[in-house]
Amino acid sequence: MSKGKDSTTNRSVMYISSVIIVLFVIFGMFLPKEMGKVANDTFAFLTTDFGWLYLLSVAFFVVFIFGIAFSRFGNIKLGKDDDKPEFSNFQWFSMLFGGGMGIGLVFWSVAEPMMHYLTPPMGKGATPESMRTAMRIVFFHWGIHPWVIFAIAGLALAYFQFRKDLPFLISSAFYPLLGDRIYGPIGKAIDILAVFATVFGVATSLGLGSSQIATGMQYIWGIQATPTTISIVIAVMTVLFTLATISGLHKAMQFAANIKVWLSIGFMVFIFLFGGMVLILNNFTDTLGAYLQNFVQQTLWMGNIDWLKGWTVFYWAWWIAWAPFVGQFVARVSKGRTIRQFILAVTLLPSGFSMIWLSIYGGAAFNLDKLANGAIQAAVKTEYTTAFFALLKQLPLYSITAPLAILLIIASFIGAANSATYVLAMLTSNGDMDPGKNLRSFWGIIQGAFTIILILVGGGTAVLSILQTVSIVAAFPFMLIMIAMCFSIYKALAQEKPLG
């Protein structure tokens, strides 16, 4: 295979993608209503006519990735045959667990179960049955399916980089189909679409995170959470993570990561102990059984199209948009592992962690809501972004835990944005695993500006809608790329002689 042709001189991906995204930002600044209309029209078209394709595609990804894991290809190394893992099992598992903790999990951990409980996709709301349905749906959205999507992107990046010495780019996964054309216009187009998917997916997370910070400050201290306030939060966060990126403050970023991990663990233990341990454990056991029993049916269920547009299709698009980003992370830490080890660890460990997290938060929310005569569901009905804080208000030490919750969201925000900045810089520098500081700072500023534009376009009452819209629109072409990627991966593996 050819190795890194034009790897240092060709910056077309950076120039083309950055120009288009900057133009998009300018368009949103000066013509926000027009941009909103175009985005919403595209959203309506894709979800109405192609919602089924998102569901079928992810179902195909599930069958494909586990088929590869348990086939004769499972023993192939992600690296040379004599490569050893770079990290111990404990370190590797810890990093995969860490990859499962992000803004989205903090944002939706209370809000989503309560929203499905009140307005389920089938049956009557606010009943014991709708509570069980709500938790099963949450497991479905945050369980194995998203990590299957990430595993495909990660498998492609790790296999073609570590075993075939190709650039650390999405386009490299298409070498078996395209050959040296991955270095030409077709390959560049694939990488540009990966950049778009990453920018839109991260913007969705940053928008949700900043909204939660702003509404949290309103809930705790009475500071009004207007679109302007949310934009200021994003701007401040952008300055922080961009300065950290260009200053090389690795200790500061590691400190933020440590805060996120320890606060996440602390909140889980605290809520588990004081939120109703027995109910949480019962809830986890019952929901896990229902999730496994309904796995196939839920994967392909289209019984409520309008509900699917706002939830499952949005989530699948969001995860697809995050695939280049999270795929890069899981690939980087998995060199030397076999394909079977990689797939099983990446799909099962973080999803298992997410289910435990959601059981604790969701179970405690239902328990405490009942004890507080509907206080949490009332908060969700008023402003769903305050759900986490409404839960904490029902627990001891609220004056301490509420500001710590803001700190957790900020740490998750900064960690995700910093990592995404690094990945975008890498994607636009031909897979350079140590991209320049100027490029990193550029993408940091672009991410912040892009997210602010989306918030301002969406307005105070439609932030979720605009974020759902851009995720689904951006992920659609990349979803098609991922389907083709699966066939390319299979073609390359079919030419291998498995170890063992």
Image (spheres, rainbow, N blue to C red):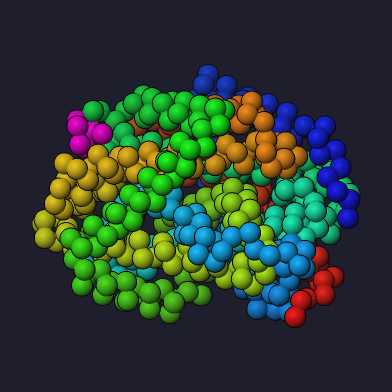
Q: Quadrant of residue 429?
A: top right
* Res. 195 in view: yes
For residue 387, side relative to residue 148 (left or right): left
Q: Is residue 206 visible?
A: no
Observer-nearest of 123 and 110: 110
Instruction: Please tell me which residue is depicted at 43% across the width and 30% down the height of the picture.
Output: 237
Residue 85, given in percent of the width and then of the height, sits at: 65, 63
Q: Residue furthest top?
A: 30
302 left or right of 438 in image: left
Give the image location of residue 59, x and y in percent.
Answer: 58, 68
Q: Nearer the viewer, residue 231 or 7?
A: 7
- 218 in the magenta segment: yes
The residue at 36%/48% (across/down) is 107
* Position of 322 relative to 286 (above/below): above
Image quarter in which the C terminus is found? bottom right
Q: Which residues are magenta?
A: 217-222
What residue lies at 63% left-to-right and 59% top-to-bottom? 86
Residue 123: say if magenta.
no
- Residue drawn at x 72%, y 68% as measured from the top left: 77
Q: Residue 91: where, in percent of width, then height?
A: 52, 60
